[in-house]
Amino acid sequence: MVYIPSGTYTPFLSDKKTISKRKIKIPGFYLDQYPTSNLEFSQFLEKNPKWRKGLPSPLFADETYLAELDSNMLGSDSKKRNSPVTFVSWFSATAYCEFYGKRLPSSDEWEYVASIPPKNKDKKFIQSVILNWYGEKRPESLPERGKYKNRWGIYDMHGIIWEWVYDFNSSSVTEDSRADKDLERNLFCGGGALQANDFEDYASYMRFGYRSGLSGKYTAKYLGFRCASSSPPP
């Protein structure tokens, strides 16, 4: 894990009540350097068989859970071993982190680290990486981890997968956002632009919108995770 220094960042969405920019203070914490790999999750499954494919309750993982993880095949495929595990639910990702004495990062922690550009690059570069990823044809097989590195030495916050965060549903909406009565509907139907701190941050519109559509049991081909910790790793 890598120690993330304390600091502040300006979130994508402005304060709901004042509609003004605010900075959020993030205490120092630890974050996995890479998203969790297929090999690492397979090792977790060996010690926690109740989370193997087909065994979790439908309440905790949908029908595509671990659709592309065949532990028997990992031994002969080094690329597959080192690529991010996907098709994992929020519940299984949380169980993984807790088994190792960790937790999922909060959305503020994740966004704080994700806002740090690579060395000698600025935040516009981050947007270009994300938008290029959105626009390119998705690979049938995920690449090995290590494609993108930010200035703090954290890899692949952008450009390979989406990642679960602990409070992914903190801005959840129903399938029809018009039915929501709270201010989160401002994320949609053009209202999102009014609440955004950076009107040109199209990448964040997509990320926040994607999170809002998730449920805890949901799994997807390009959805993985990494762990965080408030205390030093053992």
Image: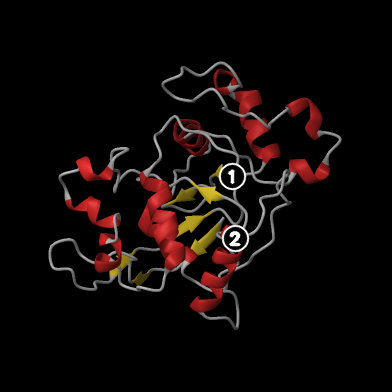
The numbered mark, 2 or 1, whose residue comes first in the sequence reads 2
Give neighbour class at mark 2: few <14, some 14-19, many 20+ (Cα, 10 Å).
few
The residue carrying mark 2 is: 135
Q: Which amino acid does label 2 sit on?
A: Gly
Residue furthest to the left in view is 17
- Tell me where residue 12 sits by quadrant: bottom left
Residue underneath mark 1: 222
In the rendered image, residue 217, in percent from the top left (x then y), is placed at 44, 29
User: How far separated are the C-alphas under marks 2 and 1?
Assistant: 14 Å
- Which amino acid type corresponds to the residue marked 1 in the rendered image? Tyr
Seen in the image, is 130 located left or right of residue 217? right
Residue lying furthest right? 76
Callout 1 secondary element: loop
From where the camera sits, is residue 15 visible? yes
Label number found at residue 167: none
**Residue situated in front as seen by the camera: 29 or 91:** 91
Where is residue 100 shown, x and y percent of the image?
A: 53, 38
Label 1 crowd bin: few (<14), some (14–19), many (20+), radius 10 Å:
some
In the rendered view, would you say 195 is above or below 79?
A: below
Q: Is residue 168 visible?
A: no
- Residue at (56% x, 72% y) in the render: 128
> In the image, what residue occupies the spot 33% across and 71% down?
10
Residue 159 located left or right of residue 172: right
- What secondary structure is marked by label 2? helix
Q: Which of marks 2 and 1 is in front?
A: 2
How did the renderer colour the structure?
Answer: secondary structure
Name the quadrant of the N terminus: bottom right
The reply to whether discs 2 and 1 touch (Cβ–Cβ < 8 Å) is: no
Relative to 166, residue 54 above or below: above
Between 37 and 58, the residue placed more toward the observer is 58
Residue drawn at the location 71% of the way across and 49% of the way down: 139
